Image (cartoon, grey):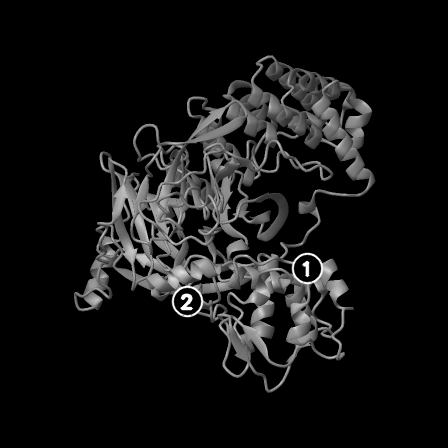
Amino acid sequence: MNIKLNHCLSLGILALVLTGCKKQYEEPEVSLESYRIEEGFNLSVIAAEPLIEAPVTIDFDNKGRIWVAEMRGYMTNIDGDDEKAPSGTISIMEDLDGDGVTDHSKIFMDGLVLPRSLAHVYGGLLYAEPPMLWFVEINEDDTPGKKTLVDSLYADEGNVEHQPNGLMMNIDNWIYNSKSYFRYQRKNGEWIKAPTTFRGQWGISKDNFGRLYYNNNSTLMQGDYVLPNVAINNEYYRPTHSLGKRLTSNQKIYPLHVTSINRGYQKGVLDADSMLVNVTSAAGPLIYRGGQFPEGYDQNGFVCAPEVNIIKRLELSFKDIRTKGKQSWDGKEFLASTDEAFRPVNLFNGPDGAMYVVDMHRGIIQHGAYMTPYLRKHLEKKGLDKIIGMGRILKITNEAKGLSEIPELDNASTKELIGLLNHKNGWLRDKAQHILLLKGGEKDKAGLESVAKNTATPIAQMHALHTLNGLDQLSFDLLTGVAKSSDAQVTAHALLLLKASDSDEEIEAVFNLSNELMTKGNPTIDLYLVNALGRWSSKNPALFMPLLSQLADQNQDPIFQEAVISSTDVKFITANLGNENQDLNKMLATASKNRAEERKNWIFERPSLSEDNRTRGMRYFKNICAACHGISGSGIEGLAPPLRDSEYLKGPGAATRLASIILHGVSGPITVNGKRYEFNAPMPGILNNPDMSDQDITDLISYLNNAFSVTARGVNAETVKKLREVKPKSGANFTEAELLKMKN
């Protein structure tokens, strides 16, 4: 049976009849004249306002429809008011007439507060609405069904810019996130939450092998050299050589125009033409796996830089056990625009092989907790703070090649789904694997095993192995056979999945396999063999420890030595492994000390991320200070003077004065920015507020300094503690005369 194309034609005809031959929305008409795309590519708008507003992430369902998380409450004005309003939605974009452009949008869920992530998994929708992670079933009429709380601490602390996001299913059947150190999986109807490496800030992607990629605001792309959780098996050692590696030292960007940058006043941030030199808001990384782009683009990295309205291309190379990246061009970008509201925040591979760009299309992209007076001034001058209520999804295609056909996955047979495991489009391979996990069973074992053994299609082999694993259909003989005969990457996956049993025959088979693989001298195989040998050695030290020791001797790379430390218990290694390698011995000493002091890698101990200081400070400011000083810090006549650019936030003694005012209050007339202010009543201090610790006051000052001054100095909690005892002469509040005498 051939897989039919799903263009929703019958649905489109029915919809037109029901609406009197009129669409509920007109297709978006958005000019792209100010956009410059690399030669040979087409850029088009497939969804725009009023269908969507402030999109931050998307996913595709089995029909190829786009589901969008709309963070409508984000920075609706320059002060970030009403951020907690339940204005967010999850919407479904539909193309009812089948021309490739969205002409209809319907709400799946609304009344959400800052929804940030979603993923079509396990036949339903996984989505994040801080602090919770939810799974909701989807009814046949596209309405929400039964809801299950997956994690109540998914994003319980932190700023909007610094909370977990991503929800990306990897080839190993685990769901990974950015800005998080947990991964998720549903097995036999139960949700599992397990520690993993902490990764990135906003957005996450993967390559064909299953390595993960991410970034932070000032680093274009980071990545792991090894597959997830390979290097963290030893809880008393935190690896540094194989995880979170910056893939290129070149962070330069090439915008088409001058843009508003948060730290543009700092030396070296802008060039002589006021253009941003290095990236400051990298986000939404993507490893392109669509199979539709020209030769040389497969598994390239792409990165959003919304602060300068560009998308950058990085060419990745995979040599032995390291991944490296380089910028494709000097002086230009893959996509750039002079539209300062173009805010690409996420990139995705699509079911048709195209690249999809999530454009939040907002004037303000910087959250209020981190906004400087410099940026605020520029935003207000340009009117960017007035650009709200918009949002787009763009589509990038190779103009010389057609798109992939989107199959009717819900109606595909097992044979068809297994065939898709070797499709050129990684999205279809991933989706086929996942559907097989949901619908498959013993009846599919033979077909999947046949693909797993076919060394001519290594990518399909890896997908087949993990599909069988998810179905609990993996056999020992299959894994040893695949590991012995396949290429290095397939062998690596087989070794990760292979667990030595207590059977004498199987232990002997594993021993023989190990010896045979060691003769190949392949760094990738050796790296993953070490991981396996560590597990097996604990069962039979006399048999496997000599092999582990031999591999450790012949591979001196610190990445490899880290794998040795990670592979098994520290005490066991110390007692059984003798090695002259200095790197290994230093790592071993660190791990041994950590174990003795019960100091684990923090990912195994913290229940959630901690909130950053400026975000906490902003919360305190809004709750304590804004009522009198104004949310913008401009002061309120008759209540309090301005904080913005106040001499009480800058210059000699400012840090001490500010902390003293917060602690003890101030009375009498006071001069700010050359203007004298009289008070009907003194400003009270918070010295005796039991809910405000020394660190809380430090965080409040950190926010005030960042938000209202560019030259202010901060204080630490120890200084605040000492200033509690420095009392005003009156015993009540400080006067201006007393404050002006203070020095830092």
Residue 28, image x, y percentages: 24, 58
Residue type, numbered disc 1 = Asn
How would you rate the neighbour count of disc 1 (Cα within 10 Å): few for under 14, some for 14-19, many for 20 or more? few
> Closer to the N terminus: mark 2 or mark 1?
2
Residue 92 vertical position relative to residue 210 in the rendered view, above or below: below
Q: Which residue position holds label 1? A: 744
Mark 2 vs mark 1, foreground winner is: 1
Q: Residue at x 55, y 78 (%)?
A: 640
Q: Residue at x 66, y 70 (%)?
A: 739
How would you rate the neighbour count of disc 2 (Cα within 10 Å): few for under 14, some for 14-19, many for 20 or more? some
Q: Quadrant of the N terminus?
A: top left
> CA separation, marks 2 and 1?
38 Å
Residue 183 can be seen, yes or no: no
Residue 186, image x, y percentages: 56, 49
The residue closer to the viewer here, 495 or 555, is 555
| Horizontal side, residue 502 vs residue 324: left or right | right
Q: Which residue position holds label 2? A: 76
- The disc at residue 36 is none
Residue type, numbered disc 2 = Thr
Q: Residue at x 32, y 57 (%)?
A: 93
Q: Quadrant of the C terminus?
A: bottom right
Dot 2 and dot 1 residues touching (CB under 8 Å): no
Residue 294 can be seen, yes or no: yes
Residue 500 vertical position relative to residue 141 in the rendered view, above or below: above
Secondary structure under badge 1?
loop
The residue closer to the viewer here, 715 or 556, is 715
Residue 236, image x, y percentages: 74, 38
Residue 353, image x, y percentages: 33, 40
Secondary structure under badge 2?
loop
Residue 641 vertical position relative to residue 200 in the rendered view, above or below: below
Task: Name the residue furthest left.
Answer: 21
